[in-house]
Image (spheres, grey):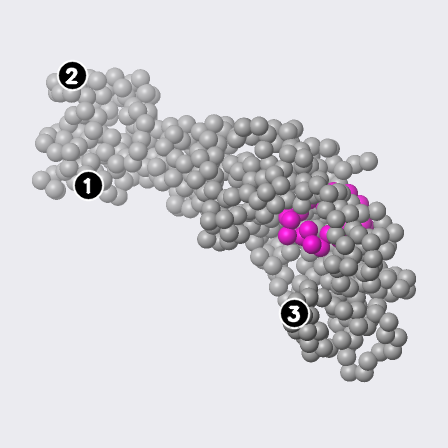
C-alpha cells in the first residue's frame, strides 16, 4: 500500500516556521517510502481565510522545494460532501441538533467552573426530539460516554483518553457550515491519508476525530504528533523569536536548503550529524527518531548552517539565489562580471546572501564613497601618483587576466621602488571603496579593465580634491 501524507494549512496567514516543519516532516516521510504528499487548504474559516494567505503558503512551499503530488484541494469546494456526511451521522443517531442558546452555554460553563469541573457541554439536547422556536441549531457529534480512545502515536507512544473526558463537539454551525474536526476527518478518509503528521497542539483533537471515524466505519490513519517549537526563553515560538513568514528568511538572505536543514533538526536527529543534504534527509528520516520533547529555536544556529551552505554548495546554485538579492540592490547581475565567479571570490565573507550581495556590490557598481579610516591611510602621501602610474601601465594591457594584472602590479612596485602595500592599498580602495575583498589581482580581473581605469581616475580626483 502506498504511503500517503498530507499538509493541511489554514490560509489565515503566512507559512511560518512551525507549519513549514510539519510540511517538511510529512513530505520527507512520503518521499522516504515512495509515497504521495497531498496539499490541502483548510479554508472553511471564511472570515479569516484569504487568497493572499493561500499564495503565501504556496510561495513558501515552492521556495523550500516541498513539491506536492496532489492538490491543492480546497475545503470550500467540498461543502456538499461534508453535508452528506453530517446527514449520515444524523441518520445513524451519531449526531443531533443542539438548540442551547449562548446564554445557556455560558451559564453551564460558569456553573461547572464554580464546581471546579472541566468546562464542557453537558449533553442537554442529546435526547431532545422537538425543535426550539427562534433558535437556529448547531449539530453535535454524539460522543461515546464510556470506554477509552487509544492512540498509538508514532512519536509520543501510546496515548489513552477516556471518553468521559470528551464532550459532544459541534460538527456543523448554526449556518450549516462544517467545523474543523468534521472536515479534517472526511478529507483524510476521502483522500486515503494513512499517516497524519502534525503539531502536538492537535493531540487533543485526535481522540474526537477517531471517534467520528469509527462512527463512519472508517479505520483511523496512523498519527504522529510533533512537539512544539519554543523560543530561546522557553516560551512558545512567536514573531519576536523568529516565527515569521518562511519567505522572510528568503528576504534575510537564507538558502532554502539551510532552512530545511535547520527545520529537520528541530525535533529530529541522526546521531551527531548537523548538516544534511535533502537526499540524506529523505534517506535517514524516521518518525521514531523524532524528539518527544519540545525543540528550541536558535537563530545563531540557523545562521551558522546558512554559512555552511553558502560555502559548500555548488557556486552556480548559490549564484541563482544571490541574483535575487543583487536585484534588491537594483543590480543586474548580467551587467558585469560572471556572478558564479563573484560567488567563488566572496562567499567566505558572508553568513547570508544579503551579506554576500552587499560585499559583492562593488563588482557591479562604482563606489560612491570610500571607507574613511581606510582612505586616511591608503590615500595619503603620493597615492595619486601611484594610482596614475598603475592606471597608465594597465591601460596598455592587451590581455586582461590575473597573470597579466599581477605582473603589472609587480612592475609598478619595482618601478617606484616601494613596498607592495604602497601600490596595493590605494588600488584596492579605489576599486572596492573599502568592501571586504579577496586577492587584488582577482578583484581587478573581475571588475574589468574599463571599470578599473574609471575608478582609478575617480580616486585620483578624490585624493587631489582632499589635499
Question: Would you say residue 206 sits in the magenta stretch?
Answer: yes
Residue depicted at x 56% and y 40% = 266
Residue 444 in view, yes or no: yes
**251 to the left or right of 172:** left
Q: Which residue is found at the position 51% from the left and 51% from the top?
A: 235
Location of the N terminus (image quadrant)? top right
Asked which secondary structure carries label 1, the reply is: helix
At 42% from the left and 46% from the top, the residue drawn is 328
- Segment colored magenta: 187-207
Residue 172 appears left or right of 52? right
* Residue to which mark 3 is pinned: 113
Circle count: 3
Extreme-right residue of the structure: 92
Q: Earlier in the sequence, mark 2 or mark 3?
A: 3
Give the label on residue 414, or none.
2
Q: Nearer the viewer, residue 36 or 116?
A: 116
Q: Earlier in the sequence, mark 1 or mark 3?
A: 3
Count residues near mark 2 (Cα–Cα under 10 Å), then give few for <14, some for 14-19, many for 20+: few
Nearest-to-viewer mark from 1 and 2: 1
From the viewer's perspective, is 149 left or right of 347? right
Amino acid at each position: 500500500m502506498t504511503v500517503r501524507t498530507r499538509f493541511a494549512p489554514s490560509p489565515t496567514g503566512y507559512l511560518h516556521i512551525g507549519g513549514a516543519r510539519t510540511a517538511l516532516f510529512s513530505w520527507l516521510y512520503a518521499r522516504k517510502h515512495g509515497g504521495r504528499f497531498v496539499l490541502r487548504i483548510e479554508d472553511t474559516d471564511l472570515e479569516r481565510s484569504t487568497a493572499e494567505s493561500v499564495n503565501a503558503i504556496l510561495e513558501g512551499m515552492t521556495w523550500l522545494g516541498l513539491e506536492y503530488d496532489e492538490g491543492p484541494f480546497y475545503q470550500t469546494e467540498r461543502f456538499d460532501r461534508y453535508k452528506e456526511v453530517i446527514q449520515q451521522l444524523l441518520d445513524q443517531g451519531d449526531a443531533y441538533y443542539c438548540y442551547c442558546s449562548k446564554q445557556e452555554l455560558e451559564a453551564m460553563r460558569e456553573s461547572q467552573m464554580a464546581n471546579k469541573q472541566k468546562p464542557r457541554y453537558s449533553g442537554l439536547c442529546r435526547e431532545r426530539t422537538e425543535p426550539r422556536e427562534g433558535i437556529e441549531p448547531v449539530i453535535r457529534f454524539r460522543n461515546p460516554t464510556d470506554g477509552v480512545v487509544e492512540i498509538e502515536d508514532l512519536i509520543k507512544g501510546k496515548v489513552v483518553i477516556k471518553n468521559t473526558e470528551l464532550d459532544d463537539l459541534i460538527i456543523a454551525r448554526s449556518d450549516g457550515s462544517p467545523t474543523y474536526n468534521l472536515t479534517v476527518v472526511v478529507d483524510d478518509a476521502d483522500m486515503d491519508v494513512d499517516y497524519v503528521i502534525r503539531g502536538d497542539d492537535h493531540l487533543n483533537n485526535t481522540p474526537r476525530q477517531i471517534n467520528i471515524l469509527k462512527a463512519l466505519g472508517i479505520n483511523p490513519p496512523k498519527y504522529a504528533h510533533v512537539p512544539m517549537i519554543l523560543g530561546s526563553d522557553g516560551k512558545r515560538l512567536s514573531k519576536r523569536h523568529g516565527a515569521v513568514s518562511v519567505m522572510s528568511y528568503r528576504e534575510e538572505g537564507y538558502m532554502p536548503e539551510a532552512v530545511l536543514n535547520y527545520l529537520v533538526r528541530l525535533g529530529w536527529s541522526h546521531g551527531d550529524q548537523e548538516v544534511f543534504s535533502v537526499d540524506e534527509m529523505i534517506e535517514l528520516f524516521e518518525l521514531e527518531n523524532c524528539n518527544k520533547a519540545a525543540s528550541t529555536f536558535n537563530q545563531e544556529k540557523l545562521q551558522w548552517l546558512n554559512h555552511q551552505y553558502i560555502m559548500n554548495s555548488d557556486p552556480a546554485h548559490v549564484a541563482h539565489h544571490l541574483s535575487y538579492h543583487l536585484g534588491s540592490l537594483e543590480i543586474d547581475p548580467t551587467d558585469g562580471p560572471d556572478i558564479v565567479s563573484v560567488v567563488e571570490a566572496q562567499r567566505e565573507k558572508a553568513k547570508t546572501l544579503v551579506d554576500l550581495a552587499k560585499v559583492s556590490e562593488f563588482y557591479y557598481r562604482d563606489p560612491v564613497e570610500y571607507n574613511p579610516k581606510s582612505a586616511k591611510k591608503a590615500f595619503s602621501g603620493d597615492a595619486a601618483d601611484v594610482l596614475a602610474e598603475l592606471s597608465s601601465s594597465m591601460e596598455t594591457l592587451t590581455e586582461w587576466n590575473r597573470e597579466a594584472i599581477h605582473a603589472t602590479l609587480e612592475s609598478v612596485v619595482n618601478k617606484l621602488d616601494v613596498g607592495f602595500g604602497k601600490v596595493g592599498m590605494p588600488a584596492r580602495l579605489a576599486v572596492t571603496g573599502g568592501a571586504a575583498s579577496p586577492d587584488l589581482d582577482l578583484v581587478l580581473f573581475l571588475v574589468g579593465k574599463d571599470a578599473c581605469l574609471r575608478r582609478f581616475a575617480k580616486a585620483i580626483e578624490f585624493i587631489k580634491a582632499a589635499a
